[in-house]
Image (cartoon, grey):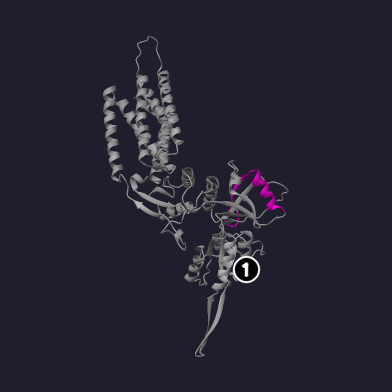
Amino acid sequence: MERKSFIRMLKNIKVLLLLTAVILSAVFLYAKPLNFGSDFVGGVYIELELEHSANSTEEMQAMKTILENRLNGMGLRDIQVITWGDQFLVVKMAKASPEQINEIESIIMRQAKYIERVDGKLALKGDELTLDTSSSGAAIVPTGEGYHRWQVAVIHNLEGAKRFGEAIAGKMGRPIDSFIDAPENTSILLTEATYKRLHSMTSFKTLEDWDIAFHGFDNGIYIIENRSRIQITQIKTIKANNDENNKSTAQEENFDFDDLEAQLEELKNNGINTIIIAQNKDDNITIQVENFIAENGFKVIRKPKGDTIYAEWIKELTGLQSSPRLNFFSSGPVYNAVIEGISPTKADAEKKVIATQVLLSSGNLPIKILPICGTTFAENTEQCGGKETTFDPALGGKFLSISAIIGIIAIIVVSIIIFIRYRKMALTIPVMLTCLSEIIIILGFASMIHWELDLLAIAGIIIVVGTGVDNQIVILDETLKRGKKKEVVSIVERIKSAFFIIFVSAGTIIVVMLALMGVEAGMLKGFAFTTIAGVLIGVIITRPAFAKIVEYIVK
């Protein structure tokens, strides 16, 4: 090829697009290393135990589907959820950092029962709303004080709109309390000292700097009992003076178990079956108290305050997520609303938006999952289930190196065959360079979107490259065809004929892969996605560029 023709070829828009895609892909691969699946790097098994056995296969399948949608919807690493019997599930994921694993486990632990209350009155249930999926369905707005207000728009159904309208009537300015997994059939146990402390406090600033109290009118007890509708039980003390040799008088506090037993009996009659021991930093609620409550037939959960601020402690005790103020009047059903909150950074606000959307759209887990044994979620709990274990890669890191060597050998063999077929190195080299370019672009795309490459994804890449070579041979054959007919067919027309074959082939592959994407088999989705991405990259970028290169060579 002459120098001028070569320069003209490089200036062609299709060839420039190919070169640009290769360069950008190389940059992405350098900046963001590829994520490999558990087949290559090992991973983590998280065994989950349900609170009770599932009633049917459909219920277990619902648990599996909801967890998969939640975990993958959060933008986390590609995760598989496997059912095991009627009371266990296994979450399988590639090796991740402790922070990522903790984030995944926190999503798993949420049953995600969403409700809204206004001064304790039920205003909305999670199954009465749908997400607003329009462009204005989510927003993040700076507050001007260094924080960011996040908003998620929702649409109420008829029943929810009526209930919400009735609940907010005459409540202008009052908080709309949003709860996720609020305790049910539960009472919170407080010492007299902590009860008095919470009763005297009328401001509860969260870490995000918003106050869950109402302008100094709502104390901590009102927030728990009235707004959250959770009954409080006070454990009383009997004080006795001990005088030893008249030297000093020390105050010892002994819990009044007779009074506690009477309160527990009343709670049981009211349908309460769980007691949360809310232990303040200075409280000394002994193990004897916990055992006494358990002996009376209650499930016991400890939630100590520790160094947590009071607002965050109350949120943990009640399941409270946010308390935006009602800022509009309504005299009837309300069909549109906004769930909002405040986060310290824009990144945190974006995470809150995604988490809220995922939890609301994925649905409630039909059965609660027990806290995972050996994790922070199992601390201070009476019962735990399941476990977290790591496993070694099935194929090992050497598999990638061996695969790369085999790939290079395959390229050399294919190059020799093509050279034997066409007897021209000028035609053989572009085929091989285009194949390499296609591989780089596919891997760069995977790096850009953080796609996890497992064994089936690698298989998809191999299939794409194989069909790519086939398509390039079709282009070469059509372009070099010397028909026996007398009429002269231009090179452009020949290439068009080749692309008709290529488009039909690509369309067929994409339709088949889309069908696989819809199958409830998570492992096949990676294979299908990689294949579709590779075919589209070939049809849009590499095949047209290769056709132009061949056109210049033949001319």
The question of residue 550 being in magenta is answered with no
Residue 149: % across, % down: 59, 53
Residue 53: % across, % down: 46, 50
Q: Secondary structure at mark 1?
A: helix
Q: Residue placed farthest to the top in the image?
A: 486
The question of residue 168 being in magenta is answered with yes
What's the residue at 53%, 76% (across, down)?
254
> Residue 249, relative to residue 26: is it above or below?
below
Question: Foreground: 421 or 136?
Answer: 136
Question: Foreground: 359 or 3?
Answer: 359
What's the residue at 42%, 58% (across, down)?
373
What's the residue at 59%, 65% (across, down)?
266
Residue 120: % across, % down: 64, 57
The residue labelled by disc 1 is 199
> Residue 160, relative to residue 20: is it above or below?
below
The quarter holding residue 489 reads: top left
Count neighbours of disc 1 (C-alpha within 10 A) and say few if under 14, some if 14 to 19, many if 20 or more: some
Report the magenta residues as a range.
Answer: 143-169
